[in-house]
Image (cartoon, grey):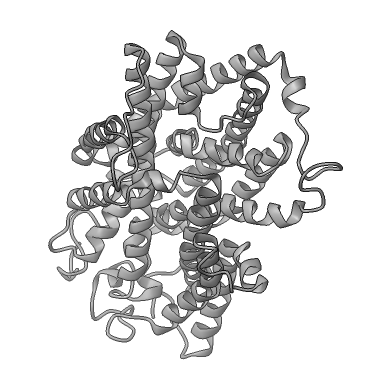
């Protein structure tokens, strides 16, 4: 970009040109459909059943949560489509040209966690597929310190290496991959439901499984105390992608394309997958006498050629989801932190390295850890960033941003030596408010002294983060010196 400082821009971070704006509404719908139909999304409603929810209650929570998160996705995506810049550059208007490195790093590290989780799931699927072919359990005894078998470790590494292809090929290859693989995933979901209905004797027995919160249930009268943490976790599930959605909408042909495509691609398909998940998981209780909420583990019980084909498609699906949702964003984010040394491709290498080092299998060891520690925890961290970005773009600046100044150290977004103290305050306050509840959820024995007030606040972590940061940022920015259109 002409006039950009070398420390703030490179070819990968520059605003996209008109010729690059090729994404139509169906590309965005296919992108979301590809990301939605994935094992981590399948696990959420299934794990809600483990928490005591009925099938319809779980589906309702998923639908409502995704309708809620669609709002910030569209609001933040609007800026990407209008100015053609990625998240790590857009966030400079609120945090400052240097301060933007903080939210970019936070977003990148969360994505690395997700990348590791998806890679673990893909490796597990690959191992299960090989086991079906060889008629053997290939996991092996758990290794010291790692806690997984040698077969699991090898499958994880193989799948990790297989995904490096897309680091080379870039975003256009991802768009094509998602467009072609999305229909295959729909076929797998239909096949799973057909199997569940056939094996369990129809939909009646499945949907008849009562809620633990109803009369006579083990958690009677405790519905709302469980509903809010689950609803918050569901709303924050796509919280990370809500931030870096400009990485995709910057390629939109029109604003209408990104709005329609995302509205069609997220809430409806997510609710449909939830219905598939609860039908299949409820069926396992009838068929096997226990709830099997992991589709990869379920495949080991079903067996047959159909399972092999399904596992192969799940493997393909995991690659497409992982690259689109968890590698593109952090690759841009790491590049924005050090543009002179880190390109988009190098940022991708950093992402896949961190994703392996965090030992993601530990995050999936229980439904409690997956929902209340991982999903709610990162929602508490990223929610404030979303609130600040929405407030800055729509309220403070009225959608008017100087794209050129986003790449200049001496421009209107320099604030105080490149940092906006007001944005830092608006970010820090809700994070600190949610911190006691997060610590209690992560290590209840160690932080048993955390009172019900703080754990109650944490039940609404993503909402607290978005709302509190939004209000604080608007108040601080509008009560200080006037902010000019496109200025800081």
Residue drawn at point x = 46 percent, y = 20 percent: 300
Q: Residue 81: horizontal and vertical position, in percent?
A: 41, 53
145 vs 390, nearest the viewer: 145
Q: Is residue 177 visible?
A: yes
Where's residue 377, x and y in %?
A: 49, 60
Residue 105, picture quadrant: bottom left
Residue 3 percent coordinates (x, y): 18, 69
Q: Residue furthest top?
A: 305
Residue drawn at 54 percent across, 42 percent down: 260
Foreground: 364 or 335? 364
Which quadrant of the figure contains the C terminus?
bottom left
Disc tally is 0
Q: Residue at x 64, y 13 (%)?
A: 199
In the picture, the quarter occupied by the N terminus is bottom left
Residue 125 horizontal/vertical position (percent): 38, 27
Quick one: which residue is furthest to the right in this view? 215
Q: Is residue 218 above or below residue 123?
A: below
Q: Nearer the viewer, residue 367 or 387?
A: 367
Above or below, 158 against 248 in this view is above
Image point (37%, 81%), residue name: 420
Q: Quadrant of residue 422?
A: bottom left
Nearer-the-camera pick, 127 or 159: 127
Is residue 16 visible to us here? no
Position of 298 compared to 103: left or right? right
């Amino acid at each position: 970009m002409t006039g950009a400082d070398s420390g703030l821009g490179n070819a990968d971070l520059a605003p996209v040109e008109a010729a690059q704006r090729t994404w139509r509404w169906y590309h965005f719908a296919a992108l979301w459909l590809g990301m939605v139909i994935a094992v981590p999304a399948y696990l959420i409603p299934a794990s809600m059943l483990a928490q005591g929810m009925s099938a319809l209650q779980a589906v309702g929570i998923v639908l409502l949560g995704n309708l809620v998160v669609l709002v910030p996705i569209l609001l933040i995506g609007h800026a990407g489509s209008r100015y053609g810049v990625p998240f790590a550059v857009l966030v400079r208007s609120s945090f400052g040209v240097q301060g933007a490195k903080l939210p970019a790093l936070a977003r990148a590290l969360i994505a690395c966690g997700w990348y590791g989780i998806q890679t673990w799931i893909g490796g597990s699927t690959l191992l299960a597929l090989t086991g079906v072919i060889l008629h053997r359990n290939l996991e092996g005894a758990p290794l010291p310190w790692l806690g997984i078998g040698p077969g699991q470790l090898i499958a994880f590494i193989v799948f990790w290496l297989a995904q490096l292809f897309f680091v080379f090929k870039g975003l256009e290859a991802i768009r094509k991959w998602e467009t072609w693989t999305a229909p295959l995933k729909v076929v797998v979901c239909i096949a799973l439901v057909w199997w569940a209905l056939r094996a369990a004797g129809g939909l009646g027995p499945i949907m008849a499984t009562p809620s633990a919160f109803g009369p006579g249930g083990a958690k009677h009268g405790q519905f709302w105390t469980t509903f809010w943490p689950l609803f918050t976790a569901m709303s924050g599930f796509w919280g990370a992608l809500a931030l870096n959605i400009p990485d995709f909408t910057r390629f939109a042909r029109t604003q209408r394309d990104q709005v329609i495509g995302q509205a069609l691609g997220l809430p409806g398909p997510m609710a449909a997958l939830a219905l598939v998940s609860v039908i299949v998981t409820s069926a396992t209780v009838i068929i096997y006498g226990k709830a099997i909420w992991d589709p990869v583990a379920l495949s080991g019980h079903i067996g047959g050629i159909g399972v092999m084909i399904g596992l192969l498609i799940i493997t393909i699906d995991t690659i497409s989801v992982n690259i689109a949702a968890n590698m593109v964003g952090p690759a841009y984010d790491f590049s924005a932190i050090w543009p002179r040394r880190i390109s988009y491709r190098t940022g991708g290498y950093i992402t896949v390295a961190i994703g392996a080092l965090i030992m993601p299998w530990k995050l999936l060891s229980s439904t409690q850890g997956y929902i209340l520690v991982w999903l709610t925890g990162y929602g508490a961290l990223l929610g404030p960033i979303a609130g600040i970005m929405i407030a800055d773009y729509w309220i403070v600046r009225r959608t008017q941003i100087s794209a050129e100044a986003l790449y200049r150290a001496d421009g209107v977004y320099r604030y105080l030596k490149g940092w906006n103290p007001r944005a830092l305050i608006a970010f820090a306050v809700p994070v600190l408010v949610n911190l006691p509840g997060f610590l209690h959820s992560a290590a209840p024995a160690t932080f048993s002294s955390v009172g019900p007030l703080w754990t109650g606040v944490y039940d609404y972590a993503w909402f607290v983060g978005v709302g509190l940061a939004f209000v604080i940022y608007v108040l601080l920015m509008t009560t200080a010196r006037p902010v000019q259109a496109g200025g800081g």
